[in-house]
Image (spheres, rainbow, N blue to C red):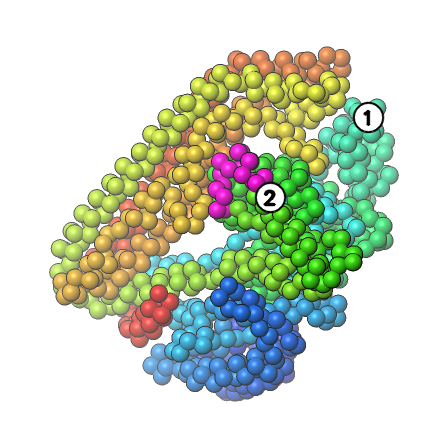
């Protein structure tokens, strides 16, 4: 519940129902969507309910006619598209447009006397993107905030068509009412129907990962794109590379919130012990970068109190009394009215020391204890189904944070790499981030698009230049930067194994010009292009279609069962079961062929690993141009951290990955072909999506299957549902399968790392090297074979799960639709017709 609903209920004299509305999660948008049946559930008494409906009707009319509720912004430029010239929308035109559309909505929002359903909902979904050309941002300063205005309820201008948001809302209302009509009986059909209706609800959420070093302009870029000023701190405050910041929509209230998740006490105690021991072992290296980073981390949290203290002393309560949530393994939640206020509060949990800006006056910095900060923004169109994740460059030495980092990177459908345009092609750190994360994003993840974003494109020497001259200089440099970046990408062999040129796109942006418009139009800054990308990710078409299609199938099953048709279904059952057996055979044979291809590739990878492990080890244990004294500290960090060292601002050193490289190289091409990330490509060469019982063909054969048309409709939708579920399972399982090679190597190496870490004093460097080399020499052959077999076993398990789920789901669906008659199943013909109409409209 939000303040709007609470205030309205109080104003109308319905305070006693506030808790009920709160329990049901009624906010301003859903209040305007309430139909008669939902109102009856909320307010059971007839008298108060009648008054409430009258007040709600008046509110809807007020929302329609009051200019202040239509749009509070002044003139805002409309977005340009390739086929639509740019133009200016005046306030008067927008009001007229809304007023012309709303009377139609009022007429359509009637109640069916038989079913009691509201035939239309008042408010469209905020994630509707069917009219992208009319998206606006209110960039005027409002109490130190600029933010995308609330998207107003809108109907498609197409005659006789609801917006997708209204369709989704309408069908959800229908299915909630159908669920209540089902008899309270404990039988297979009834239980299936109730569970299927619950399973229709899905929360589509796309993850966009944002990489970039401090000063690249990430914060300003994100603030500008989502239209919220001062949300993420920027400027002179230096970013802490350990803390991940997620930015998403607040769906619960109209506040700005920050949810701070800490690492555990045990994790910090272990890390503290490692940090203090590192400083003790390297007391004579005070100018070393790793030494300085360790001092910075301890000083941020403890000031100077950490010096000459033990780990036990530094774990005392007095150091954490301002954050008791850390001690109790709970999240800390900050809530504010404005973005600026929230930013000032959470800066100490995400940033390093600074003397000005948002961090001025902060004495304690808690970022060493923070695992992740999730910032939630109210009422933002760009974040309805999207989470932006501001990510550290190469993970973290803390295992908990690193595990979260890998999980997020592997789940990103889009990745933005942000760098300053002045050094875009030559920026070493940006390209190293891309290379080090490519296997987590590509074969080990689900990334479909990499966007390389060059910021500060307006930052150019324009003295003695006319406005047109400045504009030409900016465009010229932008084009040069794009060409140079594309050439650089074409040479990244490691990245190109996972991503084609079609997946890579370059943008040259200026957040400052987007706001000021001194030399460039908004579209020329290319920020609107990035906003369009977010809006495409927010597109709820697939969510709406899946929900409506699933509802159509469920209602077809109910109506088919309720008719108790006496026609003999033996022939159609026999035909469908035979078809299913043949289709499962095709799927099995295709997946077995894939297994043989992987076995061949992996066998080659094992042989290459056996012949090249010494060379691969030498490249890590005896790096060229590295003095033994300096490398001693590096190798110590490697063995202490299980074979991985993540120096700040430098390329990650991963001994496990090096040993597994021949294995991963051997299957990369086959893996990419079998488990593609590209949207149009399908796993296992599309064999899952080709699976079909031929129900659509049967429905098209005239009167032959007329008696079972409803059952065939249900089976057709069940096919689509199970295939979507299997594709989701495959998408998640492929990450585990791909990482199994390195995970097996990592597990096999842990024993020798532990032994190597025990060496100290003179000769410890040689002892560490010898321990690792001897371990690989003695167990390498077994280790590489084990990694191969583990991946093949994972593939077999996936094959068996896919076949079992396909067969069980479709066999159960056949049983329910053609071999089970409904007992006291209600008639849902009216609901079926309404949903069928919506389904045809969507298709």
Few, some or many residues within 10 Å of mark 1 (<14, 14–19, 20+): few
Does residue 822 sit above or below 720 in this rendering? below
The residue at the point 37 percent across, 67 percent down is 842
Residue 501 lies in magenta, yes or no?
A: yes
Residue 301 lies, in percent from the top left, at: 79, 43
Q: Which residue is mark 1?
A: 285
The residue at the point 77 percent across, 32 percent down is 289
Which region shows up in magenta? 487-503
In the image, 264 versus 64, the foreground residue is: 64
Compute the Cα span from label 1 to label 2: 38 Å
Whichever of labels 1 and 2 marks the residue nearer the N terminus, that label is: 1
Tell me, yes or no, if residue 794 can be seen here. Answer: yes
Residue 243 lies in magenta, yes or no?
A: no
Does residue 2 sit above or below 326 in this rendering? below
Residue 592 lies, in percent from the top left, at: 31, 34
In the image, 429 versus 71, the foreground residue is: 429
Secondary structure state at the residue bearing disc 1? loop
Q: Decide whether the magenta segment is chiefly helix, strand or loop.
A: helix
């Amino acid at each position: 519940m939000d303040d709007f609903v609470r205030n309205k209920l109080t104003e109308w004299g319905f305070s006693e129902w506030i808790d009920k509305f709160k329990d049901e999660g009624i906010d301003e948008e859903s209040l305007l969507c309430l139909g008669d049946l939902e109102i009856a559930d909320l307010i059971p008494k007839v008298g108060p309910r009648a008054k409430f409906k009258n007040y709600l009707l008046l509110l809807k009319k007020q929302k329609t006619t009051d200019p202040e509720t239509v749009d509070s912004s002044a003139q805002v430029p409309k977005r340009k598209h390739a086929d639509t010239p740019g133009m200016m929308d005046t306030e008067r035109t927008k009001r007229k447009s809304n007023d012309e559309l709303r009377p139609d909505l009022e007429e359509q929002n009637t109640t069916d006397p038989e079913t009691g359903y509201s035939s239309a909902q008042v408010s469209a979904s905020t994630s509707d993107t069917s009219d992208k050309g009319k998206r606006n941002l209110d960039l005027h300063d409002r109490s130190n905030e600029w933010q995308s205005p609330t998207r107003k309820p809108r109907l498609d201008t197409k005659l006789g068509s609801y917006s997708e948001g209204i369709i989704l809302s309408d069908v959800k209302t229908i299915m909630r009412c159908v669920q209540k009509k089902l008899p309270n009986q404990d039988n297979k059909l009834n239980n299936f129907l109730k569970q299927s209706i619950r399973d229709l609800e899905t929360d589509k959420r796309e993850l966009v990962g944002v990489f970039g070093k401090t000063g690249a302009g990430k914060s300003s870029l994100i603030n500008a794109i989502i239209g919220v000023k001062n949300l993420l701190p920027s400027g002179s405050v230096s970013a802490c590379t350990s803390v991940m910041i997620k930015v998403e929509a607040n769906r619960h209230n109209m506040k700005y919130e920050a949810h701070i998740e800490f690492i555990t006490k045990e994790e910090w105690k272990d890390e503290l012990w490692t940090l203090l021991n590192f400083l003790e072992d390297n007391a004579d290296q005070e100018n070393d970068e790793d030494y300085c980073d360790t001092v910075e981390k301890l000083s941020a949290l403890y000031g100077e109190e950490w010096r000459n203290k033990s780990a036990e002393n530094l774990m005392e309560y007095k150091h954490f009394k301002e954050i008791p949530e850390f001690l109790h393994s709970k999240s800390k939640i900050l809530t504010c009215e404005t973005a600026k206020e929230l930013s000032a509060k959470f800066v100490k949990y995400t940033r390093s020391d600074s003397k000005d800006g948002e961090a001025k006056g902060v004495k304690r910095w808690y970022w060493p204890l923070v695992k992740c900060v999730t910032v939630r923004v109210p009422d933002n169109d760009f974040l309805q189904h999207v989470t932006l994740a501001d990510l550290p460059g190469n993970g973290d030495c803390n295992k908990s944070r690193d595990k979260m980092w890998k999980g997020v990177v592997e789940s990103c459908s889009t990745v933005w790499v942000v760098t300053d345009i002045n050094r875009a092609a030559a920026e070493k750190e940006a390209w190293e981030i891309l290379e080090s994360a490519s296997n987590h994003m590509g074969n080990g993840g689900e990334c479909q698009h990499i966007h390389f974003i060059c910021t500060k494109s307006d930052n150019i020497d324009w003295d003695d230049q006319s406005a047109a001259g400045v504009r030409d200089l900016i465009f010229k440099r932008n084009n040069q930067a794009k060409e140079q970046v594309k050439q650089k990408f074409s040479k990244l062999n490691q990245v190109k194994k996972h991503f084609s040129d079609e997946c890579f796109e370059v943008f040259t942006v200026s957040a400052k010009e987007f706001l000021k418009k001194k030399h460039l139009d908004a579209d020329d800054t290319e920020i609107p292009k990035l906003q369009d990308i977010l809006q495409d990710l927010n597109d709820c078409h697939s969510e709406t279609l899946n929900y409506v299609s699933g509802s159509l199938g469920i209602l077809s099953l109910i109506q088919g069962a309720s008719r108790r048709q006496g026609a003999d279904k033996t022939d159609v059952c026999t035909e469908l079961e035979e078809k299913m057996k043949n289709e499962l055979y095709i799927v099995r044979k295709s997946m077995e062929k894939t297994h043989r291809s992987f076995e061949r590739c992996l066998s080659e990878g094992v042989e290459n690993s056996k012949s090249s492990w010494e060379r691969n080890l030498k490249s890590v244990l005896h790096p060229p141009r590295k003095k033994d004294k300096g490398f001693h500290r590096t190798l110590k960090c490697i063995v202490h951290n299980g074979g991985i060292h993540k120096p700040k601002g430098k390329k990650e050193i991963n001994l496990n990955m090096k040993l597994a490289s021949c294995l991963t190289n051997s299957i990369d091409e086959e893996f990419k072909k079998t488990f593609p990330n590209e949207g149009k490509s399908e796993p296992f060469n599309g064999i899952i999506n080709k699976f079909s019982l031929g129900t659509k063909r049967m429905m098209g054969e005239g009167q032959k299957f007329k008696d079972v048309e409803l059952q065939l409709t249900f089976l057709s939708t069940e096919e689509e549902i199970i295939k979507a579920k299997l594709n989701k399972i495959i998408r998640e399982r492929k990450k585990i399968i791909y990482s199994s090679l390195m995970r097996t190597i990592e597990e096999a190496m842990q024993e020798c790392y532990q032994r190597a870490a025990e060496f100290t004093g003179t000769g410890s460097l040689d002892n560490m090297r010898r321990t690792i080399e001897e371990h690989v020499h003695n167990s390498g052959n077994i280790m590489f074979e084990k990694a191969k077999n583990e991946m093949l076993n994972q593939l077999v398990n996936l094959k068996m799960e896919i076949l079992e789920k396909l067969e069980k789901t479709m066999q159960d669906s056949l049983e329910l639709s053609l071999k089970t008659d409904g007992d006291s199943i209600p008639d849902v013909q009216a609901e079926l017709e309404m949903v069928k109409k919506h389904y045809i409209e969507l298709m």
